[in-house]
Image: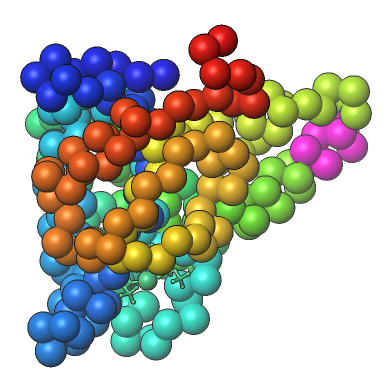
Amino acid sequence: MDNFNKELGLNIPQHVAIILDGNGRWAKKKHMPRTYGHVQGSKVVEDMLTVVDDIGVKYLTIYAFSTENWKRSPDEVSTLMKILRTYLKDCIKKCMKNNVKCRVIGESTGLSDDIVERIFNLEESTKNNTGLNFTIAINYGGRDEIVRAVKKIAADLQCNKILPDNINEQLIHSYLDTNELPDPDLLIRTSGEERLSNFMPWQLAYTEFYFTPVLWPDFNTEELIKAFEKYNKRERRFGGVKGD
Ligand code: IPE
Ligand code: IPE
Ligand code: MG
């Protein structure tokens, strides 16, 4: 579902999902450690939050750390966790100022206790905000999310809370981490990679994809508008026929 922005003359996707990629390569180009790229990348996330809100996006979901990112060096993982810690804390102030409701999706097991506590505080403090819905995927993997959902469904079947006949797409949706979110309308991935890397495979079934070679720390309002312009040229058919 879109929302028309008169100033830009563009339909704005209701839900934008972003795979922010290329932090490491951006830093390497500058002969800096990869972690410098992550610091810059987190600043861009902060900037984009208000930019998308001002343009009229209702839901923004970003992929911050995947279930596969633990494969990186202990040094890089610990810097990413440090950045997340700071981000989760600072985000409360920014969300309260901008009426943003923040959620975190992904598996909390495996994250350190203080990060889990910060996630709880951020979600609790912002839960009554009525503006932009901002979702951060941390220790998130689409397949892991489906496995967790299937386990919950199996447990509910076992205690007769649901019956096999009740299983349909809506029910599965209700067991996913994203149960409060509509499916994304537009997925943006930076850095030139054209793959999902385990990001929301269920939810992205009919989403429009936009890939750009721009590295995430260089992403800005102009690049976002380019993505929206491209999105406006797409014809979403959902399996139907043109003009229906
Ligand atoms: C994205 O940038 C941030 C995370 C995955 C946490 P990368 O760290 O993947 O940067 P590249 O892809 O190696 O350049
Ligand atoms: C995807 O990026 C994960 C996040 C953006 C958090 P990666 O850089 O980890 O993905 P691959 O390894 O290139 O597929
Ligand atoms: Mg990458």
- Label the magenta part by its dominant secondary structure: helix
At horizontal 77% and vertical 38% (from top left) the residue drawn is 153
Magenta region: 153-161
Is residue 218 rendered magenta in the image? no
Residue 50 appears at what percent x and percent y?
13, 36
Q: Quadrant of ligand 3?
A: bottom left
Q: Is 128 positioned to the left or the right of 243 in the image?
A: left
Examine the rendering and report whether any part of residue 90 can be seen: no
Which of the 4 image quadrants contains residue 185? top left
At horizontal 34% and vertical 65% (from top left) the residue drawn is 192
At horizontal 71% and vertical 52% (from top left) the residue drawn is 147
Q: Quadrant of the C terminus?
A: top right
Examine the rendering and report whether any part of residue 20 can be seen: yes
How many circles with numbers are drawn on the protein?
0
Residue 122 appears at what percent x and percent y?
29, 42
Is residue 154 rendered magenta in the image? yes
Q: Is 238 positioned to the left or the right of 122 in the image?
A: right
Residue 75 appears at what percent x and percent y?
32, 86
Q: Quadrant of the N terminus?
A: top left
For the residue pair 196 and 239, the one nearer the viewer reads as 239
At horizontal 54% and vertical 47% (from top left) the residue drawn is 200
Which of the 4 image quadrants contains residue 60? top left
